[in-house]
Amino acid sequence: MSHPCVVTIDSRSAPRVLFSGDRLVEVDLPTGSRVVYPKPPLKPLKDVDAAIRYAINHPYNSEPLYAKLRPGMKVTIAMDDISLPLPPMKRPDIRERVLTIVLDLLADYGVDDIEIIIATSVHRRMKDWEIRHVVGDKIFNAFWPKKLYNHDAENLANMKYLGTTEEGEDVELNRRAVESDLIIYVNLNLVPMDGGHKSVAVGLCGYRSLRAHHNPRVMRQCYSYMDPKSSALNTSVVRMGRLANKKLNVFTIETTINNRMFDTPLEFLAKNEDDLSRTERNALQALRFTLDKLPQPARQAIFQRVPSPFGVTGVFAGETEAVHEHTLRKSFEQYCVPVVGQSDILITGIPFISPYNVNSFLNPLLVQVMANGYLFNLYRGAPMVKKGGTMIIMHPCTDLFDNEHHAPYIEFVHRVLPETRDAMELHKIWEPKFAKNPAYIEMYRYGHAYHPTHPFFMWYWGEAGRQHLGRVIVVGADNEYIPQLLGWETARTMDEALRMAKQTAPPNPDIMALHCPPIFMADMSVEKQRAPLSALPEGQG
């Protein structure tokens, strides 16, 4: 018997409504198709502040935080950037609540040499108002901008080399953090690939360290980014993090949240369409109609500018790896939906948001990383689609970029991709040129642009999907150039896409659709083959 979140379409089923960027599209799926829905949100903690205090006083594999403190010591607090959660969380953000309690404790113990670093790695610098939203007014006013600031991976004088792992990976981190008596990392764990050693070893590093694992060779050895034990990327990061933690005094605080992405007026977007009340069905139709009539910026604002009512489900503190075990367990509890049997055709809408376009447009390269990277990898066990199968996605693939945030992406898509889509060639020939581009580095350091190597990393993150899938078909693209550039086919409607997909699929293909967001993971088990009738014992069959 299948899990309640795995729904099989029959002749009475309502049409499914899937995201296509910042629009919602009604889709009639063939009878027998399976649709995977997210689990209901886990119940949030009743007293979050009490949970924070308990966690830092009863840490895993570590003495309590207060026991690490002494007057006059140098403390660096590092914290996750705007790439999570998605969308941003209603105030107070859990990071504000953790910071408030930690800063009060530091003050009680006479610690006043404190700096707070946004662990951006090579992501864009957060703007002051974005930081204020995360840390709250009191902390922002007390620390910004001299004692609360974005990490700068290209300020080479402010980076310090720690050593090399047994596999030759260079570990180079933010100098202020390395030279501190204590690093406290405040994490918000959105999905299982976040947190753990990734926090310090990636969040506070630069290009010299990132290139050890953000490359096509490593990405092709990742069998699910969301299942750390089967990810070569995670294995590399763990090696680097262990080296860092041997030399540094790191106290990790990780928090988990539920998947309540949509607030009360839009909560129906997470539900099975067959279970909607008449009021909810009417609201859904009205929302679809409104989105179709509005200009794009207004559509995006409806979803992206309304903070999400995520509930905090766990707070864990102490030694990095011991903490992360508990974080992963809680994360899998929220996200993992048991699914039996891979599909021949996997269908998904591409929503309006990714970790890399908060407060900006989801450009074509980010559509690619959402499809071939994140959504393809939302599994544990086996991929949701068979090797060589087809993925059908829904997105307009508009040729539009945010000039401030994604400047290097524009050249990557329009100059580099027409030359080659081969990730190895991109890595060897083009990436080094971009890495040294002074104009892009200036925009990263003093503006709000992603690092010049970031578009390459976004392409490499799609390697797992590209190597596994036979075809990707886009429904609803507003142009053919971009999908062709990405190596994809186009269809005007879902019916047309399914006809195309069936040409290279086995007879009576297994079709599966993902109803996300909110986020979920398929806990996949490959369906056992039935024994042939001749092999069954007498009396069975």
Image: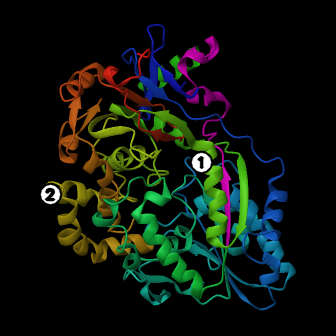
Does the rendering let one see residue 477? no
Residue neighbourhood size for the residue with mark 1, other residues' Cα within 10 Å, grouped as few (<14), some (14–19), many (≥20):
some
Vertical placement of residue 493 versus 174, above or below: above
At a point 56% along the width and 35% down the height, the residue shown is 38
At a point 61% along the width and 85% down the height, the residue shown is 248
Is 269 magenta? The answer is yes
At a point 36% along the width and 67% down the height, the residue shown is 214
At a point 41% along the width and 65% down the height, the residue shown is 233
- Quadrant in which residue 349 is drawn: top left
Vertical placement of residue 214 versus 535, above or below: below
- Residue 380 image offset from top left, x and y in percent: 47, 47
Give the residue pinned by disc 1: 332
- Residue 49 image offset from top left, x and y in percent: 82, 58
Give the label on residue 395, or none.
Answer: none
- Quadrant in which residue 110 is drawn: bottom right
Give the residue pinned by disc 2: 420
Q: How far apart are the two marked residues, 1 and 2, measured between alpha carbons?
A: 38 Å
- Amino acid under disc 2: Thr
Residue range in magenta is 252-281
Q: Secondary structure at mark 2?
A: loop
